[in-house]
Image (spheres, rainbow, N blue to C red):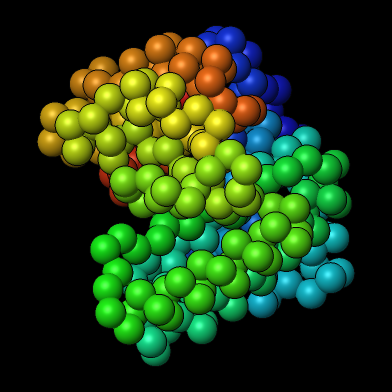
Amino acid sequence: MPPTPAVPFTLDFPPPSIALAGVRSQGEANPREPIEWAASAGFRAVTLDASAPGLRARDLDRSARRDLAALLRRLELSFCGLDLWIPPEHFADLAQADRAASATTQAITLCAELSRDSGGGVHAVSIALPRAVQGERARVFDEVVSTIVGAADSAGVLLADHSWPARDDARQDSPLRVGLDPASLLLRGEDPVTVGASLGGRIGVARWTNADSLTRVAPRAPGGRLDIASYVGALRTTTRVERLVVDVRGLAHPRDAAGAVIT
């Protein structure tokens, strides 16, 4: 089916990417259905879900990766990176750390290959790393971070850590960057505009999420507290972020919420 013509974005920013982790159907037999939905909804860029069955790095051989890149080109969708939402505690757990590190390094390789096959550019694998790790778990965690940051550096891929507060080693001169999630900041009583401006070049991925006084809401929800125009303005003037990533995970009607962004 031919893609729906894209709706112009009105915030003086390129049209956003849609994070497919938030719009995939549970138990979906066709892992590519959310990609096709994104194109039909009018999106022109996608952030793929690297934990979805059939799209995990270990599920895709070289031929399947080329086919996936070809699908994106056919649907006129730009590839904008991967989400890999491993539970943060796994990166520091003695029984889970090796598996978490392996999954992340495989996703990094997949991201690099899809970037190359889809037209180039530097893209990010979004993850969430734990905070306040102590004792023997801290040693394990430090080794994991060293491994995955080294893999990202070698592959020319960024790692965007979406946990908060931002890590000191998430810097502009490192493959490890900050993933900015406005809803999380709002629910912590922080201002995403101020935070975005202060982090500047340390930001690797900027989400478009929103929250009211109690919980996450749709990006354009009337009760949402994100000043999207000011947020975009801060990103444009202080960061190298090229487009927002619409993230509707946890919402009751995620596809409706996502579609409302561009209609």
Residue nearer the viewer, 246 or 243 = 243
- Which residue occupies the foreground of this view, 108 or 74? 108
Q: Residue at x 44, y 31 (%)?
A: 199
Q: Is residue 155 above or below residue 22?
A: below
| Residue drawn at the location 62% of the way across and 51% of the way down | 175
**Residue at the extreme left of the image, as rendered:** 214
Residue at image x 40%, y 12%? 230
Q: Is residue 253 left or right of residue 174?
A: left
207 relative position to 78: left or right:
left
Q: Nearer the viewer, residue 242 or 72?
A: 242
Give the answer, above or below, for where 145 lies relative to 231.
below
168 vs 171, left or right, is: left
The answer to which image quadrant residue 254 occupies is top left
* Residue at the outermost bottom position: 95
Is residue 216 something one can see in this rendering? yes
* Image coordinates for residue 139, horizontal then vertical, percent: 40, 79
State the image coordinates of residue 170 (x, y, percent, origin top left).
Answer: 49, 48
Say whether residue 18 is visible: no
Figure label count? 0
Q: Residue 1, position in %: x, y?
A: 75, 40
Q: Is residue 229 above or below residue 62?
A: above
Which of 212/178 is in front? Answer: 178
Q: Is residue 218 above or below residue 233?
A: below
Residue 200, image x and y in percent?
50, 28
Residue at 51% across, 74% down: 144
